[in-house]
Image (cartoon, coloured by chain):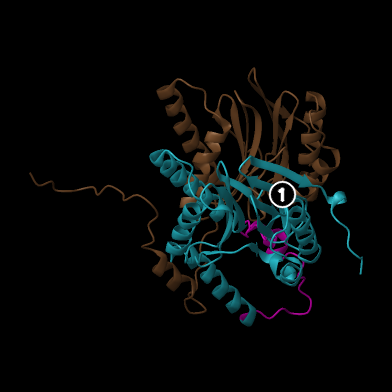
Chain colours: A cyan, B brown
Amino acid sequence: MCGLLPRVLQLRSSFKMATALRFPANVSTFNNYNDLHPDWTQREVSTGTTIMAVEFDGGVVIGADSRTTTGAYIANRVTDKLTPIHERIFCCRSGSAADTQAIADAVTYQLGFHSIELDEAPLVQTAASLFRDMCYRYREELMAGIIVAGWDRRRGGQVYTVPVGGMMTRQPVSVGGSGSSYIYGYVDSNYRTGMSKEECLKFTAEALTLAMERDGSSGGVVRLAVISEQGVERQAILGNQLPKFSTV
Amino acid sequence: MALSCVLEPALSGFNFDNSTRNIVLENGSEEGKIKAPKPMKTGTTIAGLVYKDGVVLGADTRATSDEVVADKKCAKIHYIAPNIYCCGAGTAADTEKTTDMLSSNLTIFSMNSGRNPRVIMAVNILQDMLFRYRGMIGAHLILGGVDCTGSHLYTVGPYGSMDKVPYLGMGSGKLPAMGILEDRFKANMDLEEAKALVSDAIHAGIMSDLGSGNNIDLCVITKEGWTISDLTESPL
């Protein structure tokens, strides 16, 4: 597959260099190729993220951190990973920035067209299926982990997760991205059914903060959004206002 | 009627016919190994920021080919539309051609629709094209412009990712440039402050990065129009 070919070639030639070169003791190693061209200039932009979504009675709460990295460099420290797909349907993006932006744009178009044809607001399940179709069909080429969340009249607030590979499943609470590994325990022990909107907001903010503390690829501000019948309310919790935990 | 010589029109997209030949050449026997020619990279510092009345873009003017300076007065701020300019870092040929194609597309659009192009439209066209080529086009671009919706600054990466930002530095000298920008940027600066900040950011890149140097180009875009100025100080 064409996109992978150049990287495979690079790996093979560098392996050959490592075995063949022998530096005499008096040759300086100061002007290496690698010094002039640091690693992050060649890496793809990745969202290396923590994203989360929780259902409550009447809507959903979604949240994400705001860091985009290129290798070890933070390309954008105020990214918005909560992307609107339709009036009351959002997606949380994790994985490759380019891939997820392209997929979100394509699904926004498809869902908009579908909604106009139907002359009705689209269902969250439809949006999630569109994401799943694209992520599964092009699974070899794409690196995208997406959480689709929103409100519709038929089933209220719903959260669907479409991880890398293109599976789709509905979950009452879902976490994703590189930082999610650090908060599965917290989420499993603290989630209860029947939480109110404010409790869900607090739960999401705390979980994201904990993940941002431990994951190098997550950080910045916590972006939150509440989607319900009334519409969408967005907020951002800045670095110094994040909930504090014990500093061990 | 049969023609004695027939020119086959080029198929669209990339042609990978020579890739097997290249692999054989590069991995040949120890004496017969041939290194592929490296494309010229601009080894650059570029920066942009949004100020009270518009956008200021800045760039250095050095183009390098490995360790040699290939061009001392290379223009890295490219014209896209009368109200949109683009700074390019990465492979020189890719940024040149990409911005040329974008500019042509937007001119045709302007003529067809009778509208001035918007910055977000330029961004969308770039994203589509760079994503389609899956990172093979090494263009790291900062797009800035003023349109009927306001002043905007966007960055587009070679894989097709896009970010909307109030200020940004790109290129091999982006770390020192970002240091200066992070320290002194404020929202709604006035023109003199904004120009001083961008030129200081590029200056920091020139001082701290081997691949950037020579002069500083500045481009100021406002609702009324644009001005390109050359800072004739030559730091190195």
Please say if A48 is above or below A223.
below
Name the one closer to the observer, A27 or B126: B126
The residue positioned farthest toward the top in the image shown:
B224
Residue A51 visible here: yes
Name the one closer to the observer, A241 or B7: A241
Q: x, y percentage for residue A114?
A: 41, 44
Which residue in the protein does label 1 denote? A224
The residue positioned farthest toward the left in the image shown:
B1
Name the one closer to the observer, B69 or B41: B41
Q: Tell me the quadrant of the picture where the N terminus of chain B can be found.
A: top left
Q: Look at the image and say whether residue A165 sits in the magenta stretch.
A: no
Q: How many marks?
A: 1
The type of residue carrying mark 1 is Leu
What residue do we see at 55% from left, 39% from top? Answer: B123
Q: x, y percentage for residue A228?
A: 63, 45
* Stretch of the chain drawn in magenta: A20-48
Q: Chain of mark 1?
A: A
